[in-house]
Amino acid sequence: MKNGIIHYRNTSKSLYVIKLDDGDYTVFECVGNREFSIGHIVTGDLDIFGLKDIKNITTNKWVYVLIQSVKLDETTAMEKANLR
């Protein structure tokens, strides 16, 4: 399990960027009903592609997401969150 913080959100596309504790970035789409806010702390299999539940530690809620891109640098993650 990896930990990270919500670094950016594109609410028009439900895409989010997580900055992982190891410095990598992950892009995911929220397919559940709950929203994330910038600064929320999350945990789960954040560096593995696919559909999964991750935990929003800040709100203490599990959320179903689609991890779309992993092991990115910040610039690439931001581009992917804005272009999809």
Image: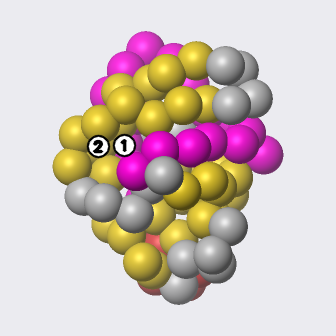
What is the magenta range? 27-45
Residue at x 62% of width, y 42% of height: 42
Residue 66: mark in rendering: 2
- Mark 1–mark 2 distance (CA, rounded to whole Å): 5 Å
The residue positioned farthest toward the front in the image shown: 1
Does residue 22 appear left or right of residue 47 in this picture?
right
Q: Quadrant of residue 49?
A: bottom left
Residue 43: mark in rendering: none
Bin the neighbour count of mark 2 within 10 Å (Cα to Cα): few under 14, some 14-19, many 20 and up.
many
Classify mark 1: helix, strand or loop. Answer: strand
Residue at x 47% of width, y 44% of height: 44
Residues at marks 1 and 2 touching, judged by CB atoms closer than 8 Å: yes
Give x and y (percent) for residue 22.
63, 75
Residue at x 58% of width, y 18% of height: 61
Q: Is residue 38 visible?
A: no
Q: Amino acid at mark 1?
A: Glu
Q: Nearer the viewer, mark 1 or mark 2?
A: 2
Residue 29: mark in rendering: 1
Residue 19 lies in magenta, yes or no? no
Residue at x 29% of width, y 43% of height: 66
Q: Amino acid at mark 2?
A: Leu
Does residue 46 appear left or right of residue 10 in this picture?
left
In the image, residue 52 above or below residue 63: below
Quarter of the image with the C terminus is bottom left
